[in-house]
Image: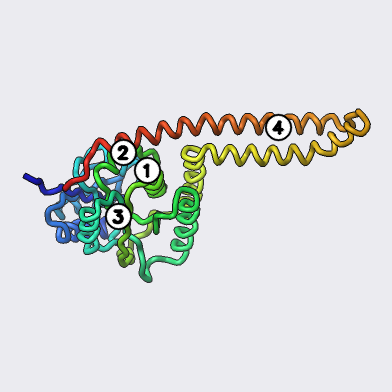
Amino acid sequence: MTQTPTLAVLIPCYNEALAIAGVVTGFHAALPAATVYVYDNNSTDDTASLAREAGALVFSEPLQGKGHVVRRMFRDIEADFYLLVDGDGTYDPALAPEMLRLAQAQKIDLVNGVREGAAYRFGHQFGNRLLTGMVTSIFGNRVQDMLSGYKLLSRRFVKSFPALSGGFDIETELTVHALELSLPIAHVTGTYKGRPEGSASKLNTFRDGFKILWLIAVLVKHERPMQLFSAIAAVLTLVAIILGIPIVTHFLATGLVPRLPTAVLATGLILMASLSFATGLILDTVTRGRREARMLAYLLYSFPN
């Protein structure tokens, strides 16, 4: 007998008292069979009590940052599908049934909610497009709106995802995980609504933008070590050749080395280039092993019927 797939709505929250009750009731109405979980991240207002009154199961995560909350939710909760959504009331619950239908019909592991609408500020749009473009140019052009906080994930995605980020950069990590394992991805576009009057965004454009840039650099090192260290080796080799050609030419003509420090520098750069290339080879083998381990964890779970 086929069982009905279970769905968990996961809402990370920090000081969302103005919106959380409407978010919880909205997702209860859109997905009556789903269980709504709210994880409170050290709120200083009535977020937790209001979420509980609205019918959510409320838990807490003392480590500050969205990444810590998501990691805790993925560890604690067992379901066939996970709908991850911010608790600020900016995402439309009416979009959730279509995201779930699409995931079930086409066996999609990541259904990403793409934002549109006047409330989506130009500065955030520009930063999102820039960062999304950087990630897709490196890891694969299959994701739109990487930083959206509205995602439906399969169980096999969640249980193979080694969440390591602590803050808003968790969205980037989720995207790279999907791209690196070549997981099925789909998109659903919906209206991005303004935050309730009196509430403020927790996202700092520049601070969190730099954190995401740093994470991208780290992920390139972890997931594309051969390309990164080969590029470094190529630059070092080019500089060494530029410095060394006049010295070698002079030596062949006269038998003398006129600029010994420059010759030593060029030799050192060649040695560093060789070391960089060898490092890339070794780390590429390690990365392959890590990727295989994640894929094996992913394959432990079958897609729910």
**Is 292 displayed left or right of 100 in the figure?**
right
Amino acid at the residue labelled 4: Ile
**Is 284 displayed left or right of 256 in the figure?**
left
Can you tell which mark lies on residue 160? 2
Q: Earlier in the sequence, mark 1 or mark 2?
A: 2
Secondary structure under the numbered disc 1 in the rendered image:
loop
Secondary structure under the numbered disc 4 in the rendered image:
helix
Question: Picture coordinates of residue 163 (x, y %)?
Answer: 35, 39
Query: Is 36 drawn above or below residue 233 in the view shown?
Result: below
Q: Earlier in the sequence, mark 4 or mark 3?
A: 3
Viewer-proximal residue, 151 or 38?
A: 151
The image quarter containing residue 290 is top left
Amino acid at the residue labelled 2: Ser
Amino acid at the residue labelled 1: Leu
Q: Neighbour class for label 1 at 10 Å: few (<14), some, many (≥20)?
A: some
Identify residue for label 1: 181
Q: Earlier in the sequence, mark 3 or mark 1?
A: 3
Per the model, the C-alpha gap separating discs 2 and 4 is 40 Å
Query: Is 10 drawn above or below residue 115 in the view shown?
Result: above
Per the model, the C-alpha gap separating discs 1 and 2 is 10 Å
Per the model, the C-alpha gap separating discs 3 and 1 is 15 Å
Secondary structure under the numbered disc 2 in the rendered image:
loop
Per the model, the C-alpha gap separating discs 3 and 2 is 16 Å
